[in-house]
Amino acid sequence: MSVVIKKEAYRARYHEPTNPYHIALRYGLERLFYFLRQQHAEQYTTHIVVEQRGKVEDNELELEFYRVCDGDNYDKQKLPFNLVFADKQSHSTGLQLADLIARPIGLKTLKPEQPNRAFTIIEEKLYKNGKNSAVGYG
């Protein structure tokens, strides 16, 4: 599963756009919940680890995270997630892996016709929520 937002196109489309990171967070959390529900694991708490970006950005992200988890989401239900901030210096293996996967997905979105061997390798492993495309193009 991935969430990609083309910020320039998004801002051009809406008169007063919401923070694109918040939109991506919302979509990502909703899709993760759908995945957990398909696995019959939605009753367990899932810890979401994010890399710290700065005090203001982290506070905004945390507020939006708990707003979405408290029911401000598509299904209007509580989501069983807990937010964990990781310092860049922690060298988290999970965050490093996320970075390695995010780049090919981003390149596929920005330059879909360009050969992208890394994306070809990971594409079949991405959760697609029953859809044909693993990458959002909007």
Image (tube, rainbow, N blue to C red):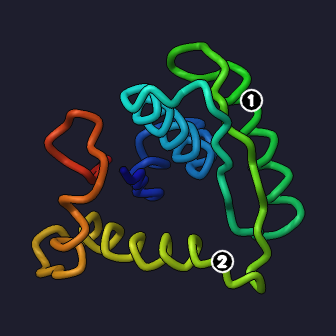
- Residue found at x 27% / y 63%: 109
Q: Report the label total.
A: 2
Mark number for residue 92? 2
In front of the other: 42 or 96 = 42
On the rendered structure, is 34 left or right of 129? right
Give the x, y percent position of residue 115. Answer: 11, 81
On the rendered structure, is 28 left or right of 123? right
Dot 1 and dot 2 residues touching (CB under 8 Å): no
Q: Which residue is mark 1?
A: 67
In front of the other: 56 or 92 = 92
Above or below, 77 against 99 in this view is above
Task: Give the Cα separation between the discs numbered 1 and 2.
Answer: 26 Å
Tell me which amino acid carries mark 1.
Arg
On the rendered structure, is 59 left or right of 83? right
Give the x, y percent position of residue 106. Answer: 35, 69
- Residue found at x 68% / y 29%: 69
Give the x, y percent position of residue 10. Answer: 44, 47
Judging from the image, what secondary structure is the residue with disc 2 in?
loop
Tell me which amino acid carries mark 2.
Ser
Label 2: how many residues lie within 10 Å, few (<14), some (14-19) or many (20+)? some
In front of the other: 122 or 115 = 122
Earlier sequence position, callout 1 versus callout 2: 1
Residue at far right of view: 55
Q: Of the residues tagged 1 and 2, which is closer to the observer?
A: 2
Judging from the image, what secondary structure is the residue with disc 1 in?
helix
- Residue found at x 58% / y 45%: 25
